[in-house]
Amino acid sequence: MAKTLSVEAPRIDGARLSRTLAELGRVGAYKDEATGLTGVRRLALSAADGQGRRLVIGWFKAAGLKVSVDRIGNVYARRAGADESLAPVMMGSHIDSVPTAGRFDGCLGVLGALEVVRTLDDAGLRTRRPLTVAFFTEEEGCRFGTDMLGSAVATGRIPLEKAYGFRDKDGLSVRDELAKIGFLGTADVRAVKPHAYLECHIEQGPILRRHGADIGVVQGVQAISWREVVFTGKSAHAGTTPMDLRRDAGVAAARLSLELRRMAGSGRFGAQMRATVGSVLLGPGMVNVVAGTARCTVDLRNPADAKMAAVERHLDAFLKKVGREEGVKVSWRQTAKTPHVPFDAGVQTVIADAAARLGLSAEPILSGAGHDAQEWSRLCPTAMVFVPGEYDGISHNPREFSTPKQCADGVNVLLAAALALAERA
Amino acid sequence: MAKTLSVEAPRIDGARLSRTLAELGRVGAYKDEATGLTGVRRLALSAADGQGRRLVIGWFKAAGLKVSVDRIGNVYARRAGADESLAPVMMGSHIDSVPTAGRFDGCLGVLGALEVVRTLDDAGLRTRRPLTVAFFTEEEGCRFGTDMLGSAVATGRIPLEKAYGFRDKDGLSVRDELAKIGFLGTADVRAVKPHAYLECHIEQGPILRRHGADIGVVQGVQAISWREVVFTGKSAHAGTTPMDLRRDAGVAAARLSLELRRMAGSGRFGAQMRATVGSVLLGPGMVNVVAGTARCTVDLRNPADAKMAAVERHLDAFLKKVGREEGVKVSWRQTAKTPHVPFDAGVQTVIADAAARLGLSAEPILSGAGHDAQEWSRLCPTAMVFVPGEYDGISHNPREFSTPKQCADGVNVLLAAALALAERA
């Protein structure tokens, strides 16, 4: 490990950061009926995403960064270093959102990295290594079904041609939708090899706030498994079909949802197992027709790969049992799967040291959500800076909120850590 | 009761009936992926419904019937009687369908009545009372949420202006959709007062077929209650939100589905209680977002009003319990409710006598489904003729099938019963 910078790092402009977050948050804004708040709906490669991308690229260019777009729509913005022969320190995240989002998820990492560059410009500082600010396509996976898509392609986990073929629920392909919003770039998707990768992100959970910690030093990302499960029974008249003659796909879906909740609460698969059925589509979906089909999503999380494997074995057995007992056919496909990803211990130390020098309390934390950082960790030393969130860290919801100070603390740590890493030989 | 006709009734042309059913079944035909069969999708007031209506009206006119359309789009086709001062005997049903239908539900009653008229024309017979063949708007309730809509308006249960305001899930109103397909008629919705009402319909259940009966003499319709239940919890990140902090509307919906199934199986609410959750819409409905809202339909059936009331009390208590235990707000509205409707004993006798004279085995049966007949039973003596169906009487499914003989038997009974009733003073 190189030693951290001996000079005092400059401080970022927290008000400017908040203004920039608010401005991007207006792109794809919608009125959320459930909360009465203004939320953000900027699904990957939608028109709103295109508008958001152009806004952020405008800011990159205004900060003098050299922008390139690769073939999967990832955007890289480079600030020259004193030694251009050295690999850059990259800071990144995403600006696509779930359909009911706030304005912090992903955006804090991208606009925080922009704020780092603006601060260095204001201070007239040039780093030894170049700095790259990046944002990646379809991190959420909400539209095309596979999360971390852009960074997975950039780091070689998913081949470009395979990613191009992924389609949304309307049958629109990644490639066509990239072209439609003008982000089917020309740069090689495998061209970027950073010296290190840093990502600042909201925690999206309650832990840091409950512990009173200013900063989370992320140790890694828990294992994630997504499935799409389809039950096929028999649609039938709701008024005349006796209960014991039914093959009700909706009942099978309900059993799946409750079994996953029971499993998570049983303790058998670890206290941090999480399981969610976030989408259920019944066909034909009418009040007086027994459902003949049910298409369900399953989202499983576990900090331990072995426990995740046990969850999946139990789920396999349960699906067989439900199929037999309900007289429904069961099929499923894996829509995403990532193992537990440990982050680099050295980069974690750099982040913890940066927080300490800034007088911020920091604690190690495991991420419950997937992040672009887990993809980049295959290519280079990587770790993340977590920022606490209010309201139990609610996220994927318009109530998502981190205070200006929480955000500024996180980005000051990002700045200090990036400066430290960028001085390394 | 008047005595039945002493002369031998003519017999209908079963092949002509089957051809007519097949021809109407091509309007709104679709390829059903679940079954590999061609199904029927002719939702009320859709373009396909308009096309089907015009086809049937063409047949009515070709048979010399005088056609009128009322303000709710019900279609009446009148055949003059020897004594035009007497109220007509009406035969009717519906031609709208659920989204995944076969070609018999409703259509058998309408085209069977047309076949009765054609048979009388062929035989050169004029009845004493006029005969009316009718079909009614939105019997299924699948599109605008209230079943038996047209006959409910014609018989005074639902005011016309209220019915006009009902909207489908795209916000389109009954009135506008009637106008769009050219069926916003001008006849008074309350003008028709039949002497008696007959409806021939498929059973949509397994009972007649299992008992080897040719004909069901319908004693009445069980009580029906439809609700739309909305659970409002909190959408949240599926990866980071601990299970015990969730307010998952999808879990609440799953519990509702399984509790209803448990109730029906418990025997506590009668062996013939039926309960179905046919539609569940989760919001936002994404793989990695805990559902903040769940909108569910509930379809309850019971032959006994007192037992239905007990089911609803239990359901009310269960919804409160789920709301409390899951931390979700629960709201619901009644989208349809009809009590047990007993049919006229005299008309049942006419039907049973007709079957006996035709050498057909008949048995009394209670209808599990709602029918237009239950609305007309408020205005005049009413009963129904049920025809068995193959494959356990599956309905609301492209596999729905009654053999040409089963259909012809039912329509021969309809003819004989109509002749008997039409001779009464």
Image (cartoon, coloured by chain):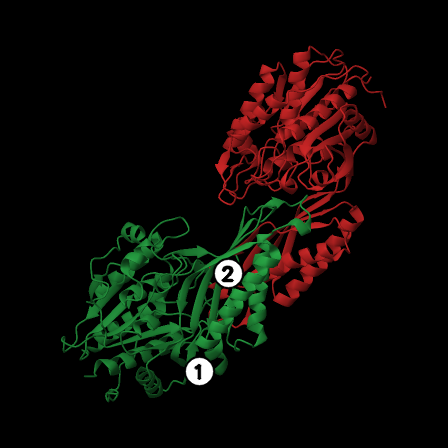
Chain colours: A green, B red
Dots 2 and 1: beta carbons under 8 Å?
A: no
The answer to which quarter of the image holds residue B158 is top right
Q: Is residue A140 above or below residue A266?
A: above
| Residue A403 as seen in the image, left or right of residue B213 | left
Q: Residue at x 69, y 21 (%)?
A: B132
Q: Is residue B324 above or below residue B113?
A: below
Q: Which mark is residue A278?
A: 2
Q: Secondary structure at mark 1?
A: loop
Please give the chain letter of the residue carrying mark 2: A
Give coordinates of residue A132: x percent, y percent.
Answer: 23, 71
Q: Secondary structure at mark 2?
A: loop
Q: Is residue B285 visible?
A: no
> What whole-number distance in Å separates the C-alpha atoms at marks 2 and 1?
30 Å
Give coordinates of residue B89: x percent, y percent.
Answer: 74, 21
Q: What residue type is disc 2 on? A: Gly
Please give the chain letter of the residue carrying mark 1: A
Residue that mark 1 sits on? A213
Q: Which mark is residue A81?
A: none
Q: Is residue B192 above or below residue A44?
A: above
Q: Quadrant of the C terminus of chain A?
A: bottom left
The number of numbered badges drawn on the structure is 2
Q: What residue type is disc 1 on? A: Ala
Q: Is residue A22 visible?
A: yes
Give coordinates of residue B300: x percent, y percent.
Answer: 69, 48
Chain-order first, disc 2 or disc 1 = 1
| Residue B414 as seen in the image, left or right of residue A357 | right
Q: Residue at x 38, y 59 (%)?
A: A26
Q: Specify whether disc 2 shares its chain with disc 1.
A: yes
Q: Is residue B309 above or below residue A373?
A: above
| Residue A112 as seen in the image, left or right of residue A70 | right
